[in-house]
Amino acid sequence: MNFSRKKPGNIILFGSGEMSPTGRKIHEEILEKSGYTVPIKIGILETPTGFEVNAIHAWPARIQEFFQKGLQNMKPEITRIRAWRKVGIYSTDDPDIVDVINDQDYLYAGAGSPSYVVTHLADSRALEKMKAAHQAGTILCLGSATAVAMGRFSLPVYEIFKAGLDLFWLQGLDLFSMYGLNLAIIPHWNNHEGEDFDTTRCWMGVERFKKLQVLLPGETVILGIDENTAANFDFLNKQVEVMGMGNVTVIKAGKEQIYQAGEVFGVNVLK
């Protein structure tokens, strides 16, 4: 790794907007605080979009270009980690593909399908390497679909919103259990794309999300992250910083607490 990084590394959860001007500022601020040295090594894990027929060219290429231009002063050396699915070529279990995760200073995995991420990262070598790299100081930057997948319970957004399946939760990858956290992570918390219907709560809407809440075990904490906003987990200092333009909402035992951009709260708030 290229900098003397505190261990474990931070975990940044984006509600959306990781390629926006606000997102660029967030990436830059986090890396500047990390004490990086040039060049910074950035890995892009392609699993979340591995199901797309144009996976080679679409989102991973866009985020690569974004990092190259937006963080050009840091001279980023970018590695695209083409681990697309559990079996076959481009496997999330292939050491020749995923072991490069160990070498990254900043590892990004973002948009796509939460249920696909869960299916193809669960019990995989790639996930093991992500956890080990995080413990060794790599910063994990997780956007939308990947953020959803990393909770104890994962919202199957496409299955409910697009395919119309009855409400349910998937067992998530439970990344935060190593810190004693039981989370359901909901990006796009304040989404307003629906012209005449409610698309907040990651396209579920308030009323439908209330029904989803009932299906969660009572000890589950819901972490809602607005668009163009990030929750920056600093486990060394046991705190979470709200960055960007919006709010982070914590729902615990039925009670809701909202934290605005610039606010910091203790990790224990989520327990």
Image (cartoon, rainbow, N blue to C red):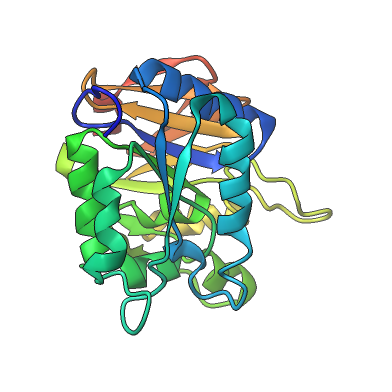
Residue at the extreme right of the image, as rendered: 195
Query: Which quarter of the rendered picture does the C terminus lie within?
Result: top left
Note whether residue 122 is visible: no
**Measured from the top left, where is residue 87 in percent x and y?**
31, 82
Q: Is residue 206 above or below residue 4?
A: below
Note whether residue 254 is visible: yes
Front one among 65 and 52: 65
Residue at the extreme bottom of the image, as rendered: 88
Front one among 186 and 88: 88
**Measured from the top left, where is residue 198 in percent x and y?**
71, 52
Q: State the residue at coordinates (42%, 42%).
A: 42
**Measured from the top left, where is residue 210 in percent x and y?**
51, 52
Residue 36 sits in quarter: top left
In-image side of 14 versus 124 (left or right): right
Residue 15 sits in quarter: top right
In-image side of 76 versus 10 (left or right): right
Query: Which quarter of the rendered picture does the N terminus lie within?
Result: top left
**Measured from the top left, where is residue 137 in percent x and y?**
23, 33
Q: State the residue at coordinates (29%, 54%).
A: 100
In-image side of 79 versus 65 (left or right): left
Front one among 100 and 112: 100
For the image, the number of numbered tags is: 0
Q: State the residue at coordinates (34%, 52%).
A: 150
Q: State the residue at coordinates (58%, 39%).
A: 68
